[in-house]
Image (spheres, coloured by chain):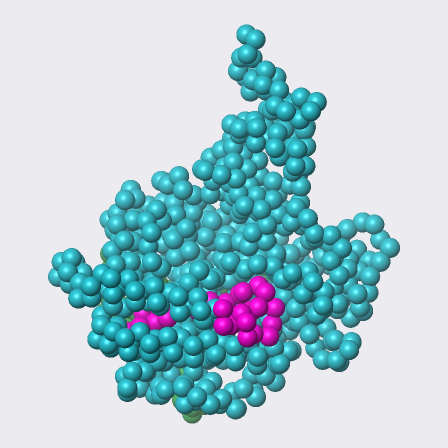
Chain colours: A cyan, B green
Amino acid sequence: MTMQQSGARAVDPFTLEIIRNHLITTCEEMGLAMMRTSYSPMFNEALDFSCVLFDRDLEMVAQAPFVPSQIGSTVHVVPAAVREVGVENLRPGDVVFTNDPYRGNCHLPEFVLIMPHFDGDEIVAYSANIAHMTDVGGMVPAAFGNHRNVFQEGIRIPPIKLFVAGKEAPEPFRILLSNVRMPDHTYGDLLAMRGSLLLAGERVAEVVRRYGRDTFVEACREIKDISEELMRAEIRSWPDGEYHAQSYIEDDGVVPNRKWLIDVIVRVQGDELIVDFSGSDPQCLGPGNQTFGTTASSAYNAVLQICERDIAYNQGCYRPIHVVTRPGTLMNARFPAPTVGGNTESHPTTVDTILKAIGQFSDRVPASDGATSGTLGFGGVDAETGRPFAYLHLEGVGWGGWEDADGNDVQFTKNGNCPNTPIEVAETRYPILTLQYELAEGRVGHGRHRGGFGSKRVMRILRDGVYVSSSTNRHIERPWGLRGGEDGANTVLGFRGRGESEWRTACERYGAVSPGKFANLLLAEGDEILFIMPSGGGYGPPRERDPELVAEDVAEGLIDELTAREVYAVALTEDGAVDTDATNLLRGGASDED
Amino acid sequence: MKTEYRDVLDMPFCGACGKVVTGGGLAAEREGRTVTFCSPACRDVFDDYVLPKYGIGFLDPVEQVPESVATGATEES
């Protein structure tokens, strides 16, 4: 019996709580440091990075609310990278680096940096960050398109030391920076990442100095054990059984008209959970494949979204969650399959599919969200500097309605917590003008609690020779409704040339295989792009929606009066108030006069 | 090729979770086959869930979709 199982703890609860919060705050501080010192908008605006702390046993002991898809993969890629370099080979000031998607990482653009922290000659902790580099070389500026293998996706680096004893290792830097389109951004962002690791080292040293190494080491162990205990209690409260769900990735950008199956069995067994993806399709030929790291993090992501207990997120809460995959499938692609879209585009649908299975016993599950990150990549040669540029555009979606409320509007899908890049920042740096940006009114999954709305954006290209690429979903498969709610609205991505009035898809205008996954379409000055993001699915029958909420939606222009009457069975008076009698009649009930 | 570098194709997959095992791992004999696991927990999942449900054939390679099905794709890639 362990100390934790017997209820006894070696570290008093006050000290334990102080150390736990110190470590979480350290992760938050690391993130702030990265945001303030980085070069690229992906870091300082989109905040597409995560910072974590591992204990000396290479188990994650603290994180902060950064990007869920990245955090879940760190528990696999960090130990794998450190063990490959060799713990015995690490010295103070070393930084290990990798972006290899097949070694537990999410996908190629996620750069992972890890620094060991010593007390005397012993490692007591590791800090790590994982961050999305805007460009990693390869055939597409900003990495998202319809690649057929990892070699087209960009440069792949196995675990190596990027800093040795506090100094840059010059050769890896030269190789890396000569293979990306914006080496100044990549270099600046890497230094920002390393800076946050140095900061973490100071904070770890402070807490070790204050409480002593033994107390710190024991506290790390107990912090994880408590989270494990709470997660096991959570799972124990769920009914034992196997719950099965399926969904599809609508296409892979390479094979025409072929959907790819995500199949999941969620097995609740006492205080353990198995999330089994082995029935999923073989890996696709395009970049929609998930790596093991992405799939594991999608399982953690789904489970953590519905937990009722207040659990500190660390490796302890992942211990009772077991992921089963088969190598060579959509959920665990093998080298050299492309995987860049698996993390941004497939991950959200995978989370929603797991939630669909869990929804068979839990009422905490929402309808599907828009499930695309809205990744449009722009690139070309900057007319002023003559140097290549790459810009990754992200966009929010509507989230699904759920038991207690409507879905959120224009919020980044479930794999990340990324804000979009402000229009002013993008227009200052890149030859793209935003003409229109608003809620996509009228397009939503209706329900007792309706889905959230997506956005509608129109952009104009300001210069000849700009390439655009896309890895977006939900052009064909709609976000599903739940418990009688209606399915949500699709993604729309249209193009038109200067002076044209009609929007046409990439298939229609450029002959692309997919409306959402294509690479390097060459645009000219004056060409315009219409980008409408999907809404969330609805929850519950629309005719059960509170009529006052329907009237509010009409007043705000989100839906029209006809939809209020025909979908929600709500009649409004001339001044927009709910006509109670007429509404009761529409809903099959008696009017007040009866 | 004589080098210290090992690529992922030279590394085993965990028999339960499917992760590439970059170092360490446990080897075990199951139904006449040597299976690698990344952790004791994965070994238990294999014995208690995977093997009874799917049999030892679970470890066989997944049949891949041939490149030829992409016929009709544009030349843009």
Where residue A388 sits: x, y (%)? Answer: 70, 77
Q: Which of A458 and A580 is in front in this view?
A: A580
In the image: residue A327, left or right of residue A413: left
User: Which is nearer the eye, B57 or A345?
Assistant: A345
Picture residue at 57% right of the left edge, 28% below the top? A548
- Residue B23 image point, x, y percent: 33, 78
**Height in image: A115 above or below A357?**
below
Query: Quarter holding the N terminus of chain A?
Result: bottom left
Say which quadrant the C terminus of chain A sits in.
Answer: top right
Instruction: Indicate whether residue A151 is drawn in magenta.
Output: no
In this orientation, does residue A26 appear? yes
Horizontal and vertical percent position of residue A312: 33, 58
Q: Furthest-right residue in view?
A: A499
Image-quadrant location for residue A212: bottom left
What range of the chain is rendered magenta?
A32-60
Residue at position x 70%, y 22% from top? A574
Left or right side of A480 for A215: left
